Image (cartoon, rainbow, N blue to C red):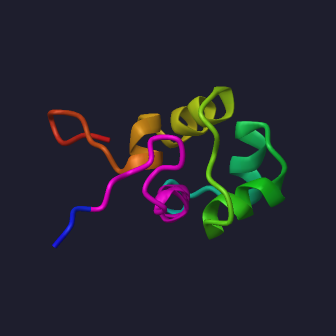
């Protein structure tokens, strides 16, 4: 069975699910998180639905900071050496 390669520009396709789970677990509405990250709510909805993924840059770093994880966890599901996001 061939191992699926992850495109480092696009992530693993599960970023939206991770964003949604993290947002809900921290008690934020879509509108609240969108405001905190400084994107419009439609952008956040598109991220969560997997229509698009956050691009590498300030918005992704801001999103990761608001959700208290590293940007790599959002895009790729990567955890650090201690198993922390």
Give the answer, above or below, for where 10 lies relative to 45.
Answer: above
Q: Is residue 69 in view from this perspective?
A: no
In reply to whether residue 48 is colored magenta, the answer given is no
The residue most toward the front is 2
Toward which corner of the image does residue 46 lie, by quadrant? bottom right
Rendered residue at 64%/69% (across/down): 49
Span shown in magenta = 4-23
Q: How many marks?
A: 0
Rendered residue at 64%/40% (across/down): 55
| Image x and y of residue 38, in percent | 78, 37
* Quarter of the C terminus within the rendering: top left
Give the answer, above or below, for where 65 lies relative to 51.
Answer: above
Rendered residue at 35%/51% (across/down): 77
| Image x and y of residue 69, in percent | 42, 38
38 displayed left or right of 85: right
Closer to us: 10 or 41: 10
* Quarter of the N terminus within the rendering: bottom left
Closer to us: 50 or 64: 50
In reply to whether residue 14 is colored magenta, the answer given is yes
Q: Is residue 8 in view from this perspective?
A: yes
The residue most toward the bottom is 1
65 displayed left or right of 58: left
| Image x and y of residue 18, in percent | 46, 59
| Image x and y of residue 62, in percent | 62, 31
Rendered residue at 65%/58% (across/down): 47
């Amino acid at each position: 069975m061939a191992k699926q390669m992850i495109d480092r520009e696009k992530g693993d396709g599960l970023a939206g699910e991770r964003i949604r789970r993290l947002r809900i677990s921290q008690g934020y509405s879509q509108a609240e998180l969108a405001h905190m990250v400084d994107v419009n709510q439609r952008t956040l909805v598109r991220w969560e639905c997997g229509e698009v993924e956050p691009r590498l840059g300030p918005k992704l770093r801001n999103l990761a900071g608001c959700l208290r994880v590293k940007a790599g966890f959002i895009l790729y599901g990567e955890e650090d050496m201690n198993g922390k996001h």
